[in-house]
Each structure stands twice: as structure tokens, then as C-alpha cells.
Image (spheres, helix red, strand yellow):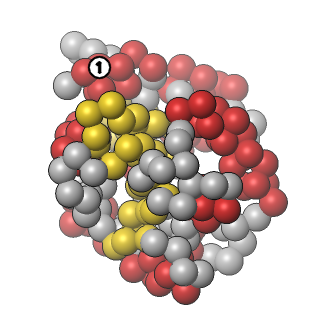
């Protein structure tokens, strides 16, 4: 793994030679979130979803179209729908996960964060929970969000904070050692990303 830092903004990223096709192939075939006991399926996730809801609730209306990008098996989508947001849906790259979500009658669509399957000006809230650190070009992902987001809509992003890596509960370089983490964000870089 080769890490690099932008001299202008301080953004840290994995500078290994990888392309979009290779990365998408990884997430379609090597995705450890697919297993039954993975993230998005257990009691620990319910605790996390309750925490998310306490943060999101002031911003959400029951009539909102809410899109969870990189939704996996759709468990956050299910949680939102079960808690009064019937227009919550998801987008997922891995067709196996999409199938699992659809077997639960969840509106999860196969697609990419780079090319969201929504009409312009049609989504009230777009949520990226631990997604942007996995993608080659987060700027293009955000540009895709702006296209389908309504004028007064919200984009929520959660990523590991690279300034707090030393506080990781596992070991201090955990987030750097996680092979699929390509981008390493600080609050400053997220602000720059959202301004573009």
C-alpha cells in the first residue's frame, strides 16, 4: 500500500495502481459484508441505527425520498421504513446483496455511487455511511449526488476520521491497514469535497 498526500489540501489517499473496474470486481466478489453475520445484520447494528436515527430525525420528514448509497443487504433501509420513512430505498453494487434485500421486499437497486439510478431533482436525502473511503473518486460520487438531490435536500456522510485513527478500538493503524480503504478523510477535506 502506497499512501500519498495532496500538497494543496492535505487529502490522504492510497496511491496504488487500481482502476474502477478492478475495484468494482472486488466489491462484487470479495465483499465480506455478504456473509450472514456481517455488518448490517446483527444487534450491534441496531444500536448503531438507533444512534443514526437520533442524529437524522430532525432533518427527515415521513414524505422524504431517502437513498442509502452502498446499502449492502438494505438493513438501514429496512430500519428507516420500519420507523416511519416509507420512501427509503437503497443502491448497491453487489447483485447478491441486492437480491437478498429484494427477497425482504426492500427497494434496493443495483447500481453505482458514480451513476445513481434516480431522476434529476428527485431525492430529498442521500446517505453515505462508510462508503466514500472505499471509492476511487469521491468528487465524482458527490457530483452524482448533486444531480439527483432536490434543491433543499441533504447529503449525510460518515467516514473514518483520519485525525482520530490513533483512537481506534482495534489498533492504531487499523483504518490504514484495511485494504479496501482508499481514501482517508478529515473534516477539512470533507468540507472541500462538498464545496466542489
Residue 93 appears in the picture as rendered: yes
Q: Secondary structure at mark 1?
A: helix
- Residue 31 appears at what percent x and percent y? 49, 69
Q: Residue at x 66, y 42 (%)?
A: 53
Q: Is 78 drawn above or below residue 143 in the view shown? A: below
Note whether residue 128 is visible: no
In the image, residue 156 lies at what x, y percent? 46, 36
The residue that appears at 43% across and 29% down in the rendered structure is 185
Residue at (27% x, 15% y) in the render: 9
Q: Give above or below for 11 relative to 132.
A: above
In the image, residue 167 lies at what x, y percent?
A: 69, 26
Q: Quadrant of the N terminus?
A: top left
Left or right: 69 as drawn, with respect to 36:
left
Where is residue 60 drawn, in percent x and y?
53, 39
Q: Is residue 97 left or right of residue 7?
A: right
| Residue 28 falls in image quadrant | bottom left
- Tell me the crowding category of disc 1: few under 14, some 14 to 19, or many 20 or more residues within 10 angstroms, Cα based: few
Residue 39 lies, with reference to residue 128, above or below; the image says below
Image quarter of residue 149:
top left
Closer to the camera in the image, 147 or 24: 147
Pick out the residue farthest to the front: 63
Q: Determine which quarter of the picture holds residue 194.
A: top left
> Residue sitting at 81 percent across and 60 percent down?
43
**Foreground pick, 13 / 90:** 90
* Residue position for label 1: 192
Q: Quadrant of the C terminus?
A: top left
Q: Nearer the viewer, residue 142 or 12?
A: 142
Seen from the viewer's position, the closer of residues 172 and 98 is 98
How many circles with numbers are drawn on the protein?
1
Amino acid at each position: 500500500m502506497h499512501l500519498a498526500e495532496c500538497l494543496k489540501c492535505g487529502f490522504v489517499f492510497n496511491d496504488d495502481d487500481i482502476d474502477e473496474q478492478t475495484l468494482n470486481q472486488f466489491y462484487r466478489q470479495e465483499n465480506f459484508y455478504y456473509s450472514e453475520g456481517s455488518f448490517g445484520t446483527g444487534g450491534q447494528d441496531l444500536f448503531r441505527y438507533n444512534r443514526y436515527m437520533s442524529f437524522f430525525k430532525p432533518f427527515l420528514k415521513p414524505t422524504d425520498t431517502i437513498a442509502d448509497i452502498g446499502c449492502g443487504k438494505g438493513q438501514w433501509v429496512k430500519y428507516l421504513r420500519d420507523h416511519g420513512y416509507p420512501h427509503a430505498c437503497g443502491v448497491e453494487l453487489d447483485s447478491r446483496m441486492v437480491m437478498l434485500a429484494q427477497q425482504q421486499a426492500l427497494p434496493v437497486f443495483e447500481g453505482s455511487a458514480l451513476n445513481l439510478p434516480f431522476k434529476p431533482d428527485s431525492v430529498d436525502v442521500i446517505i453515505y455511511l462508510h462508503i466514500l473511503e472505499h471509492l476511487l473518486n469521491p468528487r465524482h460520487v458527490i457530483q452524482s449526488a448533486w444531480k439527483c438531490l432536490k434543491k433543499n435536500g441533504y447529503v449525510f456522510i460518515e467516514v473514518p476520521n483520519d485525525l482520530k485513527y490513533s483512537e481506534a478500538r482495534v489498533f492504531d493503524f487499523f483504518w490504514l491497514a484495511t485494504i479496501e480503504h482508499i481514501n482517508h478523510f478529515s473534516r477539512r477535506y470533507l468540507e472541500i469535497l462538498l464545496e466542489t
